[in-house]
Amino acid sequence: MQKEMAYSFPDEVLKHVFSFIQSDKDRNAVSLVCKSWYEIERWCRRKVFIGNCYAVSPRMVIRRFPEVRSIELKGKPHFADFNLVPDGWGGYVLQWIAEMAGAYPWLGEIRLKRMVVTDESLELIAKSFKNFKVLVLFSCEGFSTDGLAAIAASCKNLRELDLRESEVDDLSGHWLAQFPETCTSLVSLNISCLGSDEVSFSALERLVDRCPNLRSLQLNRAVTLDKIANILRRAPQLVDFGTGNYAAELQPDVFSNLAGAFSSCKELKSLSGFWDVVPAYLPALYSICPRLTSLNLSYATIQSPDLIKLVSHCPRLQRLLFLIQVLDYVEDSGLEELASSCKDLQELRVFPSDPFGVEPNVSLTEQGLVAVSLGCPKLQSVLYFCRRMSNAALVTIAQNCPNLTRFRLCIIEPKTPDYLTLEPLDAGFGAIVEHCKDLRRLSLSGLLTDHVFEYIGTYGKKLEMLSVAFAGDSDLGLHHVLSGCESLRKLEIRDCPFGDKALLANAAKLETMRSLWMSSCAVSFGACKLLGQKMPKLNVEVIDETEPPDSRPESYPVDKLYIYRSVAGPRFDMPPFVWSMDEAVKILH
Amino acid sequence: MSEVDMAVIKPEMMKSYIWLQTADGSIQQVEQEVAMFCPMICHEVIQKGMGSSKNYAISLPQRVNPAMLSLILDYCRFHQVPGRSNKERKSFDEKFIRMDTKRLCELTSAADSLQLKPLVDLTSRALARIIEGKSPEEIREIFHLPDDLTEEEKLEPLKNTTDDPRIRLLNRLYAKKRKELKERQKLKNIEVEEERVDDRSVDDLLSFINGDNGDSKGIKNSKSKKKNRRRKDQQKNTSANEAIKNHNKEPNGLNQVCHSAEVGQKVRAGVGATSNLHDVKDDIFDNKNELDDGDIDDEIDPALKEKIDREVEDFARRLNSDWPERMQEILSFGHERKPVHFSLNGNGSLRRYANSEQR
C-alpha cells in the first residue's frame, strides 16, 4: 500500500478545528503530531495546565505558548495535606506572576493549588491584568486580606474569587468593601476559609445585591444563621450555597424566615457549610432538599438520626460528603438509609470526627459502605474512613460497583488486618483493582503484603494516582507498581519497606510520571545521588530537617524523597532542608 | 398559451442559474438560490457580475473539485430552504457529515475557500471529534502526517529507558534473572497448580532481591503513625501526633532500617559505606554481579565506565568556568521575589547547563 500524501490544510482551517479541541490531554496530543501542527497549536493555545510548577519554568511556558489566557498551577505534593511537607518547602507563585505580567497582558484566569501566594503576588495580579476574571486559590497560603483588597479594588470584571481551604491572614473584614460599586460581575465567591469575626457583613450584602449573576456563594463561619435569610433573599438565583455558622437558639420567627428564604431559591442544588449545626434548624432546608444534588456536611457535627432524616428528603442526591460522629448507636444505619433513598449517588465521603481516639465507639464499619455499594449503582468516587474492614466486604463492594473511578479507603489504625480472618487485605483490594477497570485513583490501608501490589500492577492499568502507607514487605511491592501500572502519574508512599532496588531498576518509569513521594522508607542516600546523577530529566530532592544527608554514610536511608520530572532543571528556591541530587549542583561543591 | 399553461411553465422559465467552473475546467450551472448560499459565489455575482452565462462562469478556488462542489451544493440546497426546523437541520447535518476522513478534510478545505461558515463549523467539529481521545501516533496515521518532531521539541519525556547504559543494563539484568527463575520453576514443577507456581516465583524473586536469604518478610513496623485528612479544627491533634512520631524515631534513623524487611540490610551492605560518587556506582553493580554468580557478560565495560567518568569531569569543569555568568542570571531574578536560600550544604541554586545532553 503506497503511502498517501498528507492532506494539507490552510493554517486557518486547522486552527479552527483546534478551537473545538479543549481538553489538555487532547491539546497535548495534537501538539505532538508533527512540526506544523505543533507550531499552529502553540499559537492558539489559550489554556495551560501545569500539574507541577517545578516541572517547567515560566519562561519556557511563555516562549512556547504566547497567547495564553488561562493558567492552572499546582505546587506542593499531595502529602502536604498530611503535614508531611515542612513549611518553607516551596511552591512560590510570585516568579510566575512576575513573568506572566509582562508576557500575558490579557491573562484572565489563574487557578492555583497548594501554592504559596503572597500579598505581593496578589497586588501584582491586580495591577497587571486588565481583563482579570477568575482567581481560584485552592489550599494555598501566605497571603492576607490586604492582598484580597488589592484584587477586589482593581479587578473591574472579576467573575470568580474562590479561596477554598486556603490559609488567609485575616487582618480585617473590610477588604470586601474594596469591591467598587461598579462591580456587578461576580458569579462565584467562596470565602469559607476566612476566620475573622469581622467580616464586613454590610459590604457583603451590598455586593451580593448588585451582582445579579451570582450563582455560587460560600460564606465563612463568622456569618451567623440569622443573617442567612438576608443574603438568600438578595440572591434567589443561587445554585450553590455555603452557610456560615448554622447555630442559634431556636426562635420561631428566625426559623420561618430562614425556611422562607431557602424556599425562594428555586435554583439551589448544592449546599455546604453548616458549622456547629443545630439540628432544630435543619428542617428549614426541607423545601429545597428534593432538588439537592450535592450536600457537603463535612464540617457539620450532625448526628445520625438527623442525617437520616435530612437525607431521606433528598432523593436526587449525587454527592454527599459528611462527617461521622462517633456515637453509641450504629452509624451504618445512616448509610443504609442513604443507600435506600439516594439511588443517584455518585460520590461519598465519610470523615472521622475523632481519628485519634484510642477507644473507638464502633459506630461506623465496613457494613455502611457495603450497603451504599449495593444500593447506589452509580457510585464512582469513595473516600471512607473506618476502623475495620474485611476482604469479603471489599470483594462485595468491587462486584457491586464496577464503575468506581476513585477509591480511597482509610482504615484508621495502620496495618489492621481483615477483622474476620485476621489475614492481610490483599485479596480485597485486589478485587477492587480487578473489577473496577476504570479505577484512576486508589488509596490503600490496612495490613498489606507485596501481593496487593502484584494485583495492582497486573490490573491497575488505568490507575493514575496511588497512595500507600504502612504496606508491603519488600522492594518487589514497589517494583510491581512501577513496572505494571502503565498510566501511573503520581505515587506517594510513606512508611513502607521499599528500598533502592525497585527504584533504580525502574528509574526510567519515573520520567513517565509526574512525581514520586517516599517518606520513612528505606531508600539510601547513595541511591538518591545515583538517580540524580543519571537521570537528567528528573529532579531528585531529599528532604531532611535534622541534618544534611551527606553527613551520614551513603547507605543510610533518607527521611523524605520527592522525585519529579522536569525540563527546567533543579529549582532555585530550595530551603536549607531540601537537597537536590542534581549532579551539576553536587559537583560544584 | 392559456393562463394555466403559463402558470405551469412560468416557474421553470423564471428560474435563473449561476455558472460555475471548477479548477479542472468543467463548467456547470447551479440554481441561483443554492449557489448564492455561498458567500464567495454571492460576492462574485453581486460585486463582479460574474456567473450569468457559460462564458462568464465563476472560477471556483482550486480546493473545490467537482466532487466537493457536489457535496457543498447538496448542503446548500437543503439549508437554503427557509422553512426548516432546527431539528430537521441538525438531523440532516448529522447524516451529511458521515464520510471518510479524507473526504471530510477536503470538504472542510473546500467549504473554507467558499467562506461557507456553517459548513466549515460542521466539518471542523467532526474533525475535532475524530482527533479527540487519540494519541499523536494515531492522529498521524489518520491524516498521513510526518513524524518530524525531534525529541528535544517534544516536552513529553521518553517512554523508553534513558540513554544511560547503566540503567539499561540494570533493567536487562533484572528482566533476565526473572526469566531464568521462571524457567527453572517451570522445569521443576510441571504438574503444580498455577496458583502455587506463582507464589513460588514471587518468593524466588524475593530471594533474588535479598540475595538468596530465603523468606524475607520483614518485621512489621508497629509505629502508630496515622494517615488522616488535615482539618483546620484538628491541627492541634495532628501536631500531637507528629510529636509522638518524632519521639519514636531514633536520631540516627537506624531503627527504620532495622525494622524494615531484610532488603534494607542487603541494600546497606551492597551499596557500601563510602561517600564517593564513583564508588557508589561501582558498588551497586558489584552487588548485582555477586548475585549473578560472577557472570562475566554482565560486567560493565571498563572503557565505557572510563568514558562516562571523564564526561562527568568535563562537565564539572565547564560548569565552573561559567559560574560568574550564572550568578548574574540568578541575581537578576532575585529582586522580583523572595530571597533565595543559598544553602551551605551543596545544593546551591544553579540553573542547569543548557546542553545537558553532553555527558
Image (spheres, coloured by chain):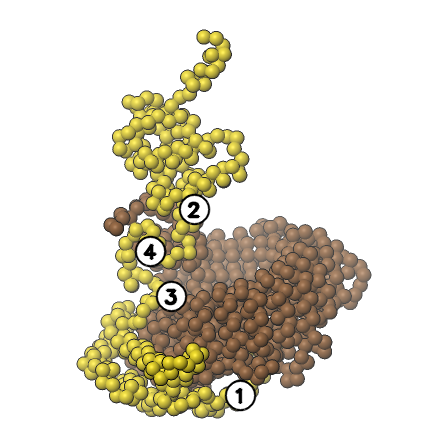
Where does label 4 land, which residue?
A33
Q: At x 21% / y 81%, what residue is drawn?
A: B301
Whether pointer 2 and pointer 4 mark residues with C-beta atoms closer than 8 Å, the reply is: no
Pointer 3 and pointer 4 on the same chain = yes
Q: Earlier in the sequence, mark 3 or mark 4?
A: 4
- The local secondary structure at tag 3 comes to loop
- How far apart in space, not on screen, are marks 3 and 1 (Cα)? 40 Å
Where does label 1 land, which residue?
B222
- How far apart in space, not on screen, are marks 3 and 4 (Cα)? 21 Å
- How far apart in space, not on screen, are marks 1 and 2 (Cα)? 58 Å
Camera-side residue of A456 and B43: A456
- How far apart in space, not on screen, are marks 2 and 4 (Cα)? 19 Å
Relative to A125, is B24 on the left or the right?
Answer: left
Q: Residue furthest right?
A: A252
10 Å crowding of disc 3: few (<14), some (14-19), many (20+): some
Chain B rendering hue? yellow
Where does label 3 land, which residue?
A56
Q: Tell me where residue A558 appears, x and y as whole percent.
A: 41, 84
The kind of residue on which mark 4 rests is Val
The kind of residue on which mark 1 rests is Ser
Where does label 2 land, which residue?
B125
Relative to A318, is A553 on the left or the right?
Answer: left
10 Å crowding of disc 4: few (<14), some (14-19), many (20+): many
Residue B186 sits in quarter? bottom left
Whether pointer 3 and pointer 4 mark residues with C-beta atoms closer than 8 Å, the reply is: no
Chain A rendering hue? brown
The kind of residue on which mark 2 rests is Arg
The answer, for residue A294, to whether it is visible in the render is no
Q: At x 40% / y 68%, what residue is drawn?
A: A486
- How far apart in space, not on screen, are marks 3 and 2 (Cα)? 32 Å
- Check the picture and name the quadrant holding the N terminus of chain B: top left
Camera-side residue of B242 and A517: A517
